[in-house]
């Protein structure tokens, strides 16, 4: 499962393998752009970076964190551009994409929707022992992947119970 934490400056990505209730770290990283570049050039870098991840790891599913609205409308709009790339790129590769709000991700990983970034990263490290996380953006992306794994497992259990 590929988790994506979109951002125009840094887009974090993280891959986990889910086998039943067991999660294991596969890989993580960050796609960085230069704030001096034009927005279209930055979006192309994000797209190309995600294509490289999708090509190398061939995930079965992807999940993207939803955009939060902040006071700066321009920053929110630019974040929306990056989020659009994060949603579209896996879809173009035939990978189903889910979306989760930040509070849902924090609740799934830490147990409270108001968790801090440090708490999220600490819990990601605990849930994925051996993961060497270089940036908070990658930890956030792994948290999105973990959240998706938990939600998918619940949906699968529900579907199995209903079909009986």
Image (cartoon, grey):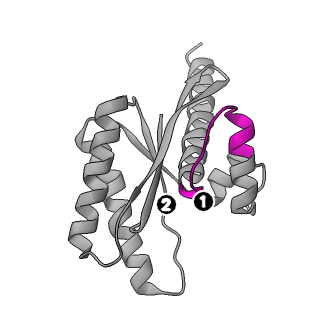
Q: Earlier in the sequence, mark 2 or mark 1?
A: 2
Q: Which residue is mark 2?
A: 66
Question: Bounds of the magenta span?
Answer: 123-137
Mark linked to residue 118? none
Image point (78%, 49%), residue name: 111
* Residue 149 lies in quadrant: top right
In this rendering, the answer to whether 57 lies above or below 117 is above
Q: Position of residue 80 (x, y in %)?
A: 38, 69
In the displayed structure, does residue 155 sit left or right of residue 59?
Answer: right
Label disc, if present, on residue 102 of the rendered structure: 1
Q: Residue 129, image x and y in percent?
A: 70, 32
Q: Residue at x 73, y 59 (%)?
A: 118
Q: How many marks?
A: 2
**Front position in the image: 129 or 90:** 129
Name the element at disc 2. Answer: loop
Q: Residues within 10 Å of mark 1 (few under 14, many from 20)?
A: many
Q: Residue furthest top?
A: 164
Whether residue 6 appears in this view of the structure is no
Residue 25 drawn above or below residue 30: above
Q: Are marks 2 and 1 in contact (CB under 8 Å)?
A: yes
């Amino acid at each position: 499962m590929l988790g994506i934490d979109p951002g125009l400056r840094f887009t974090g990505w993280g891959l986990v393998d889910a086998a039943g209730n067991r999660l294991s770290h596969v890989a993580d990283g960050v796609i960085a752009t230069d704030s001096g570049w034009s927005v279209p050039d930055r979006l192309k870098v994000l797209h190309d970076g995600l294509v490289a991840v999708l090509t190398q790891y061939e995930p079965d599913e992807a999940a993207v964190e939803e955009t939060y609205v902040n006071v700066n409308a321009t920053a929110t709009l630019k974040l929306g551009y990056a989020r659009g790339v994060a949603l579209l790129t896996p879809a173009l590769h035939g990978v189903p994409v889910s979306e989760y709000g930040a509070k849902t991700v924090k609740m799934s990983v830490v147990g409270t929707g108001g968790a801090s970034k440090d708490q999220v990263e600490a819990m990601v490290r605990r849930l994925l022992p051996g993961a060497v996380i270089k940036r908070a953006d990658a930890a956030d992306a792994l948290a999105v992947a973990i959240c998706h794994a938990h939600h998918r497992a619940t949906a699968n259990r529900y579907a199995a119970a209903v079909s009986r």
